[in-house]
Image (cartoon, rainbow, N blue to C red):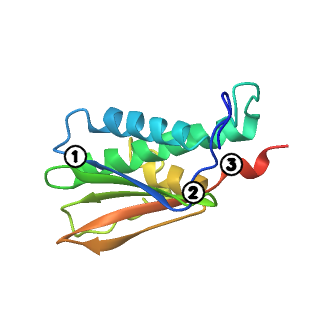
Amino acid sequence: MNHPGTAAAPDRDQTRRLPLGGREGAVQQCRDFSRRALLDWNWLAVDSTERPDDEQVAVFEDVLLMVSELVTNACLHAPGGPRELRLRWDTVRLRVEVSDASPVPPALRPSADRGQPGGYGLRVVDRLARAWGSRPEDGGKSVWLEVASPLEHRP
């Protein structure tokens, strides 16, 4: 039973889906959707008296940045933009997936292109995510990333 001011422990293996209908506003819509899900899953505080530590806040913000990067890539490189955002939380890790209609897998831009504008989104994901990749899906692909739970950092 939950007491007032106490958040429930998250159920294992929760999934949230956001169908997307094109490019316009998709990045902000996905960031807002992800922010709400992470807050619902208590990524920043167990109850109203506890404050998140700097690492928890950093991981929370990193997830929102990586969601933005995956959705932006789908907006730029896939016909029709992103199809769907999926968030899967199992209390140990978060898996973020963005599906689109392009069968072309994402690739890191070679380091030699550093002087060119843009193209750094996957580098950001590569540095911040525990793992990332893509898989074929419905004639297109799903690009995914995984992040470890920031809740492990709680004192």
Mark 3, residues whose alpha carbon is within 10 Å: few (<14), some, or many (≥20)? Answer: many
Instruction: Select label 3 or label 2 by which is in front.
Output: 3
Write the residue at 34% across / 73% down.
135
- The residue drawn where x is 59% and y is 55% is 127
Specify the amino acid type for callout 3.
Pro
Name the residue type under label 2. Answer: Ala
Q: Is residue 96 left or right of residue 106?
A: right
* Residue 27 coordinates in the image, percent (x, y): 33, 37
Give the distance between the C-alpha atoms of the residues marked 3 and 1, in whole angstroms.
Answer: 28 Å
Q: Secondary structure at mark 2?
A: loop
Secondary element at image label 3: helix
Instruction: Please indicate, yes or no, whether residue 54 appears anywhere in the rendered image.
Output: yes
Query: Which residue bears the numbered disc 1?
Result: 20
Query: Residue under circle 3?
Result: 150
Q: Amino acid at mark 1?
A: Leu
Quadrant of the snapshot with the C terminus: top right
Residue drawn at (48%, 47%) of the image: 66
Residue position for label 2: 129
Q: Secondary structure at mark 1?
A: loop
